[in-house]
Image (cartoon, grey):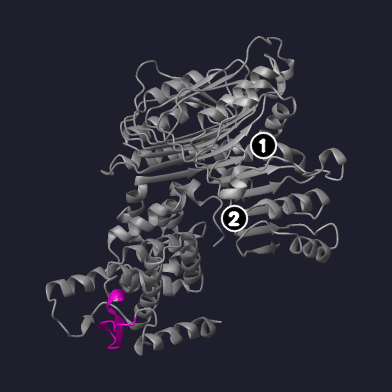
Amino acid sequence: MTEVNRRKRCKIANEDIFGRLPDEVLHCILSLLPTKYAACTSVLSRRWRDEHRWTSALTNLDLDDTVMLYGKNKPRRDGKLRTPAECKAMFKKFVDRCFKLRRSVPHPMQKFRLRLSGSYHSSRVNEWIVSAVRARVEEMIILAEDTEIRVFSCETLVVFKVSCHQIYFHVYPSTVSFPRLKILHLDCLSSVDDNACIEKVLSASPVLEELKIEMEECEPRESLNVSSRSLKRLTIHFQPAYDYLDDDDLLAYRILTLDTPSLELLKLADSASEELNILHKTFSLVEATVSLGHPPVLTKNFNDYAETLVGFFRMISDVRILALSDLTMESLKDVHELDLPCFAKFPTFWYLTRLEVEAGVDKWLTLLHILEHCASLEALIFKKEYNQDSTDPQRRGPHGNAVLSHCLSSCLEMIEFKNFEGQLAEIEIVEYFLRNSRVLKKMTVRYEREIDNSKEDVIRRLLTCPKGSAYAYHIQFLP
Amino acid sequence: MSSSTDSPTLTTETTQLSPQPDTETAKPTKKITLKSSDNQIFEVEESVAMEFATVKSFFEDSPSSTDIVPLPNVTAKPLSQVIEFCKEQIKFKANPDEAQKKKYNAEFLTEKSDKDLVDMIPVANYLEIKDLLDVLNQAVADRIENKSVEYVRNFFGIDNDFTAEEEAALRREHAWAYEGVDED
């Protein structure tokens, strides 16, 4: 009796909203939820249970054990907290169940995201990955710790992102194939066998467009050859291993080779490789962000590293937008100050229109030297590195530097100085540009901390500085 | 609380009923009249109405029609909110600014009550406004994520028709799924 009434009420309530919502909309909302919340909906009402609505959302499997291992842990009915082992067992059971229920879903799996905070037996994790591959998964995101992942072939995979503290990659020989893979991200890998594996995956991915590799503990012996005809966007982040200094085999050094003729965007931060080879002068390259420094222990001498560095810039000299980190500027400054012969081969950037430099004022002379090599520069962004003592006379700004860069007199229209603190050397740098830029249209000075000297005095000094530009322009001071 | 969130919606509604001449385009724009199921009349610019695939195909079938377009499945309040959203989206179509658009969409959503959001979904679905539907679906998913079963029932207005034993059995079946969600 009450049961009938209840159903009646339920029917009215459901008609209110769900009566008008087609299954596609519900499916869409459910598939936007992490799978565990989607699964909760089977307890909403009989209709939701009987129609197994949430299983239709299994085209998007989003599984994360973090909440249960580290979140609020609900006590069991007997009042005791669950042990991590019990939590993990529950999680495993749930994941297995999801894959089992998924078998009845006819559509391919769009997304499989697996985030593991606890450690699980590798065979179990690989079983899930294989299940996702069988379900014709298109996007796979694995965040795990200490898991050995076997690389597999997948006809349907388009996006593959792996991130973990430590992961051991093993490739089944000769069976790897990713015919549709476009985006590959590999983060925090550290293992002796990685690079061969990465090279194998690359050679098996004929349409790859985006590659990101981050490694925090790069072994000095390991070299990497990034070879891809189709690759357009490449991000590399290599840091040397902590135990680098203890390494007794100092004859080995790391080499990074880029064989990527279609590259458009390069973000390279490498302080582990001692040798950099770019096999093609990349005419297609539009934008590059460069942070290069030599590893803590050099196997070869510094001259060789300087050659490598200058050679690298020669290969990317057709770039339109370039950003140089403080580390890069430090390396170039060393080459500049030692006046090594290779520095004469520093290329002219014919097409570079925008240059961003992050550096202390002590690299000022090196920056001026680089500006001499920028033939069409329109915008210069100078971000001062903090914690530099610019009152040291060695680190002063420009003093009667005779050579005037061509770009200052012909094309540099916009200059921005970031992290301005009002120190004498910085004021002199701004004044140098104000005096010598012939076509400047806009100068922006940004301060984030308080200006050291009296702000009004600094502003007055800059405003009354003789202007070299024929254009009327204004100086902006922005916090 | 609810009256303060309602009042801005009402002001936009009046501007829709008596639209100001558009200062940006000098030529008079064609108006289309929509009628909600509770007999409210909405006069909207053609460009806004063409965002509604359902209305668009109505005019494609009978191009010369000057009739009022009846929307039998749509009530006035969600319709006015949907119109408000589409008017903004048209500005972004003319001047693409992803950051501003994101900001506007976020503000549009946060000021809506749960009921407003859920009520707009069938309207966006019926009128086939895909962008809005995507935004609404994500907003609903965000609002019910990590929430208890009871909360979700209230959110959608679903009556619990399980016996206590049935519900306990179901919860055991998916025990992991209920870990870490907010208390009922």
The lab-note entry on whether marks 2 and 1 share a chain reads: yes
Mark sitting on residue A439: 2
Marks 2 and 1: CB-CB under 8 Å? no
Chain for mark 2? A
Give how far across and how far down residue A62 sits, in percent. Answer: 44, 45
Q: Return the residue nearer the eye: A82 or A382.
A: A382
Seen from the viewer's position, the closer of residues A318 and B111 is A318
**In the picture, residue A360 is in which quadrant?**
top right
Q: How many marks?
A: 2
Q: Amino acid at mark 1?
A: His
Circle 2: residue type: Val
Observer-side mark, 2 or 1, equals: 2
Q: Nearer the viewer, residue B60 or B131?
A: B60
Q: Quadrant of the C terminus of chain A?
A: bottom right
Q: Is residue B47 highlighted in magenta?
A: yes
Q: Label 2: few (<14), some or many (≥20) within 10 Å? A: many
Specify the segment rendered in magenta.
B26-48
Cα distance in 3D space between marks 2 and 1:
20 Å
| Residue at image coords 76%, 43% | A361
Q: Looking at the image, can residue A144 be seen?
A: no
Question: Tag 2, which secondary structure?
Answer: loop
> Can you say whether A96 is above or below A460 in the image?
above
The numbered mark at residue A369 is 1
SS for dot 1: helix
Of residues B156 and B165, the one drawn nearer to the viewer in this rendering: B156
